[in-house]
Amino acid sequence: MEEYDKIIEKLKNEHPIEEEVSFNEFNLYEKLEKNAFLLVQYGEFLNKERAEYEYIEGLRDKLIGQQYDYYRFEYDKSLQKTEIEKYYLVKDEKIIKMNNILNKQKARVDFFEICVSALTKQGWNMKSYSENMRKGL
């Protein structure tokens, strides 16, 4: 989990989303204008990272199939399906390495999902704030 947090922290530094979603009465209209652009931009980041995740996931699944075949047909033909899945695949170094890569990519996807969600909520929050300001609340 420490690796996950490092990736999130690095992404926060590269993409200061907290600054983008905060607003006040003085910068409300500027933030409103910028919100749609940022939503598209971060949506594109999310789609790119999600596509990369799915690609890596496909590679991992292919690797699992290859390693399964290796254990089943080359390593020991007497092994049963459940033995291979429970005891061999989970300890396979190649699969472990691929899962680590996939987990790192998952952190990137999670970050951009949070960004898109925050920007969407920001739009609604600014709308409510603006309406309340007009009503004098």
Image: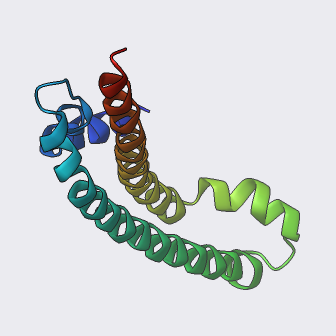
On the rendered structure, is 90 left or right of 4? Answer: right
Q: Position of residue 71 (x, y in %)?
A: 70, 74
Q: Quadrant of the N terminus?
A: top left
Q: Residue furthest front?
A: 135
Front-most of residues 99 and 111: 111
Which of the two residues, 47 or 32, is positioned nearer the viewer here? 32
**Residue 50 x, y percent position in the rendering:** 43, 66
The quadrant in which residue 114 appears is top left
Can residue 53 be seen? yes
Task: Tell me which corner region of the image, top left, top right, bottom left or bottom right, holds residue 133.
Answer: top left
Q: Is residue 110 above or below residue 77?
A: above
Q: Residue at x 86, y 63 (%)?
A: 82
User: Is residue 1 or residue 67 the one in the foreground?
Assistant: 1
Residue name at image x 31 percent, y 32 percent: 130
Is residue 16 visible to us here?
no
In the picture shown, does residue 2 fall above or below 58?
above
In the rendered structure, the answer to whether residue 19 lies left or right of residue 5 reads: left
Q: Residue at x 76, y 79 (%)?
A: 72
Q: Position of residue 31 (x, y in %)?
A: 18, 42
Q: Quadrant of residue 53?
A: bottom left
